[in-house]
Image (cartoon, grey):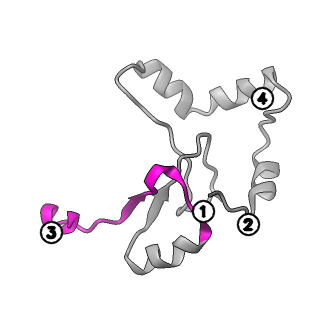
Amino acid sequence: FLEGLTGRPATFFCYPSGRWERKAWEPLQRAGINCAVTGQQGPNYPQTPVLSLRRVVNGENRSQLEFEFEMSNLKWLLKSLRDGRHVYNPPQKLAAEKGKQIV
């Protein structure tokens, strides 16, 4: 529908309600989807699968400075320094989440 409306290929997908499962990747790839975002917040890393990207939700109530702060990943670094439960360790997080499915 979108491709017919815009005349351009639709290669980006946003999971409904942000919920996803790894089993959706193959059908998405067959449909020509190159990347997809989940409802998870937080930084993406070079190893983050392109069909399960985290996102930053932006809105009119967020200033440009707040948006840039979140996009720079400083928010997540400061959060880990303030609260030991949120450790900012990308390699460790990737290893812990490898193969994990979120539904």
Q: Is residue 4 magenta?
A: yes
Q: Residue at x 81, y 35 (%)?
A: 87
Query: Circles 2 and 3: CB distance less than 8 Å?
Result: no
Q: Earlier in the sequence, mark 4 or mark 1?
A: 1
Query: Circles 4 and 2: CB distance less than 8 Å?
Result: no
Q: Earlier in the sequence, mark 2 or mark 1?
A: 1
SS class, disc 3: helix
Residue count near mark 1 (Cα–Cα under 10 Å), binned few <14, some 14–19, many ≥20: some
Residue stretch rendered in magenta on the structure: 1-22
Question: Residue at label 1?
Answer: 49
Question: Residue at label 2?
Answer: 99
Horizontal and vertical percent for residue 73?
A: 62, 33
Q: Earlier in the sequence, mark 4 or mark 3?
A: 3
Q: Nearer the viewer, residue 18 or 96?
A: 18
Q: Nearer the viewer, mark 2 or mark 1?
A: 2
Q: CA distance from mark 1 to mark 3?
A: 28 Å
Residue count near mark 2 (Cα–Cα under 10 Å), binned few <14, some 14–19, many ≥20: few
Q: Decide: is 77 above or below 43.
A: above
Query: Circles 4 and 3: CB distance less than 8 Å?
Result: no
Q: Decide: is 1 above or below 82.
A: below
Amino acid tagged 3: Gly
Q: CA distance from mark 2 to mark 1?
A: 11 Å
Amino acid tagged 2: Gly
Q: Residue at x 62, y 40 (%)?
A: 42
Q: Nearer the viewer, mark 1 or mark 3?
A: 3
Q: CA distance from mark 4 to mark 2?
A: 24 Å
Question: Residue at label 4?
Answer: 80
Question: Residue at label 3?
Answer: 4
Quadrant into which the N terminus falls: bottom left
